[in-house]
Image (spheres, rainbow, N blue to C red):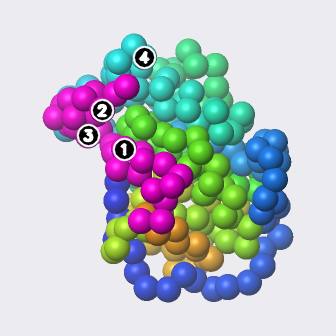
Amino acid sequence: MGMRMKHGEGVGPAGPTSECNIPAAGGDRCFAGTVTGVVLVGGGSNRMGANKALLHFGRERLLDRVVARVQEAFPRVILVSNDPASYNYLGLPVIRDIYPGRGPLSGIHAALSAVATPYIFVVACDMPFVDPKLALYLARQAPGYDVVVVRDGPYLEPLFAVYGKGCHEPIDSLLRKGLRARVVDFFSTVRVKYIERGDLSAVADVDKVFMNINTPRDLEKALQLLD
């Protein structure tokens, strides 16, 4: 599920938005009512040969580990999956895609459709080293923007990013066309704040944070880094 994507030029139209209600500074409590944590639990896990979300990672399931770390940043957390019965054991709301089979962009769309908060923080279920501090840092950059995403040269990290309600209509417009669009395909129509990966070393170990597990070899490498 986790991925790096190339991005185009430009950040989209500028200007303030009525959806930007997150204070620029202050204690973490200010985020409780303005950001929902969203864990995307999708994909066929074909390269893994098993459901990645339910793989054991150390002493816990991979999904459980990701959810627990997202909850450290944002008390309100939901899952997006088209197989809710497999994940009801967590006791969290499980949202289905409105446009099934369209990839992670459809999951982001479903989450934006379901939540009442002006922003969501999105992470893929196969990223075991979620850092709550980095998630909060990205959320604090959101005022005045629709997307906050980390950039590494020509690549973006769209599945560890913040999305505002202003993204809903542009995404919906893409998905209504019947396309399986990339997450970044709507970025040119909204206000995007790019955070340079090289500037985050003081916040988190980004090499670990952006690691995702797609294959048994990936799982082996990640377990070697498990504290």
Instruction: Kindly identify which numbered label has been placed on residue 208.
Output: 1
The amino acid sitting under disc 2 is Leu
From the image, tell me which residue sits under label 2. Answer: 225
Mark 4 vs 3, N-terminal side: 4
Q: Where residue 95 appears, x then y in whole percent?
A: 60, 37
The residue stretch that appears in magenta? 198-227
Cα–Cα span, label 2 and label 3: 16 Å
The amino acid sitting under disc 4 is Glu
Mark 2 vs 3, N-terminal side: 3
In-image side of 119 versus 154 (left or right): right
Mark 2 neighbour class, 10 Å CA radius: few under 14, some 14 to 19, many 20 or more: few
Cα–Cα span, label 2 and label 1: 8 Å
218 shown above or below 31:
above
Mark 4 vs 2, N-terminal side: 4
Residue at far front of view: 202
Q: Residue drawn 28% across and 27% down?
A: 223
Q: Secondary structure at mark 2?
A: loop
The amino acid sitting under disc 3 is Asn
Mark 1 vs 4, N-terminal side: 4
In-image side of 72 versus 11 (left or right): right
Cα–Cα span, label 1 and label 4: 18 Å
Cα–Cα span, label 4 and label 3: 18 Å
Marks 3 and 1: CB-CB under 8 Å?
no
Q: Where residue 171 appears, x then y in whole percent?
A: 56, 65
- Compare residues 57 and 201 and report the one nearer the observer: 201
From the image, tell me which residue sits under label 3. Answer: 214
Q: Where residue 157 appears, x then y in whole percent?
A: 42, 59
Q: Secondary structure at mark 4?
A: strand
Mark 3 vs 1, N-terminal side: 1
Instruction: Kindly identify which numbered label has been placed on residue 60.
Output: 4
The amino acid sitting under disc 1 is Lys
